[in-house]
């Protein structure tokens, strides 16, 4: 019968863990009931009720600004203008699926409020969120990911050093031929070839030096040939 004149937010934290892989999925469920925006001239509020109405209208105004910024894909979204928008930040423009139910009055006396509410819903429906599963990696997966990123950082660090060397040559007035100019793809392929050569070189060095067994076999064959020739003579 009587409105509490306040916003109501119910938050449920969810966590699911696979007992075999130890992977975890986490999520949040927001259930929000927003207070309606009312004109003080119609309600005749005063005192504490008037202060509550001002705060509610202010937070709803901040929510409208956030919805407008998200709908227009602006670089800055004013989430921090209100506690309400700060709490609902993940639900509005984060990794989430959001359902909004708009409540309007059918009375002609509330025409302006109804139009404002419908426009709010029209802006909100244009917002598109990119949703992905929130998975927490295991320690081994984090270790693999870290090692991959470390190698990538090392590659770009080497590339940066080579670029600095090339730039220094240009500064001293020396020209750098096209073949010697640094290219990240060529640098990566050359480094791969060098690693392969380094892994093969020990095998090549062993093959380049004839083992003692070959000399022994060769001498035995020579002796057999000499013996056969003597028998024929």
Image (cartoon, rainbow, N blue to C red):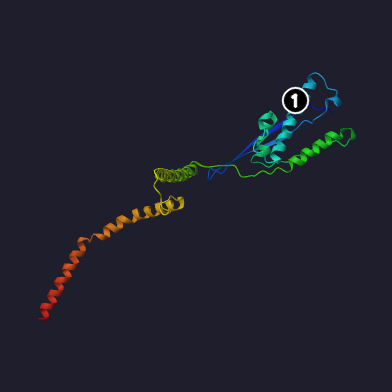
Which residue is farthest front?
173
Residue 34's spot in the image, x, y percent?
A: 75, 32
Left or right: 201, with 233 as reference point: right
Q: Is residue 61 above or below residue 126?
A: above
Residue 145, can we see it?
Answer: yes
Which residue is farthest top?
47
Residue 70's spot in the image, x, y percent?
A: 69, 39
Give the quadrant of the N terminus.
Answer: top right
Q: Is residue 141 above or below residue 7?
A: below
Left or right: 30, with 215 as reference point: right
Does dot 1 land on a helix, a strand or a loop? helix
Residue sitting at x 26%, y 60%: 208
Residue sitting at x 14%, y 77%: 228
Left or right: 17, with 1 as reference point: left
Residue sitting at x 74%, y 34%: 64
According to the picture, the residue beneath numbered tag 1 turns out to be 55
Which residue is farthest right?
108
Residue 55's spot in the image, x, y percent?
A: 75, 25
Q: Nearer the viewer, residue 218 or 190?
A: 190
Residue sitting at x 30%, y 57%: 203
Within the image, what quadrant is residue 94 found in?
Answer: top right
Give the quadrant of the C terminus.
Answer: bottom left
Q: Count residues near mark 1 (Cα–Cα under 10 Å), then give few for <14, some for 14-19, many for 20+.
A: some
Q: Nearer the viewer, residue 160 or 83?
A: 160
Residue 101, can we see it?
Answer: no
């Amino acid at each position: 019968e009587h409105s509490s004149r306040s916003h109501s937010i119910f938050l449920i934290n969810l966590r699911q863990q696979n007992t075999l892989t130890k992977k975890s999925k986490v999520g949040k469920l927001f259930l929000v009931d927003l207070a309606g925006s009312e004109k003080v001239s119609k309600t005749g509020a005063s005192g504490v009720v008037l202060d509550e109405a001002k705060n509610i209208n202010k937070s709803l105004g901040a929510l409208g600004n956030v919805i407008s910024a998200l709908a227009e894909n602006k670089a800055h979204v004013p989430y921090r203008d209100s506690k309400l928008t700060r709490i609902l930040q993940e639900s509005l423009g984060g990794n989430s699926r959001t359902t909004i139910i708009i409540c309007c009055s059918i009375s002609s006396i509330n025409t302006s409020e109804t139009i404002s509410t419908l426009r709010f819903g029209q802006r909100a429906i244009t917002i598109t969120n990119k949703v992905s599963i929130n998975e927490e990696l295991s320690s081994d997966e984090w270790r693999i990911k870290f090692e991959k990123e470390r190698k990538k950082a090392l590659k770009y660090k080497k590339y940066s050093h080579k670029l600095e060397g090339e730039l220094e040559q240009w500064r001293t007035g020396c020209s750098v031929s096209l073949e010697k100019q640094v290219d990240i793809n060529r640098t990566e392929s050359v480094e791969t070839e060098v690693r392969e050569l380094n892994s093969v070189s020990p095998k090549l060095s062993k093959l380049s030096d004839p083992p003692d067994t070959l000399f022994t076999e060769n001498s035995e064959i020579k002796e057999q040939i000499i013996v056969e020739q003597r028998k024929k003579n």
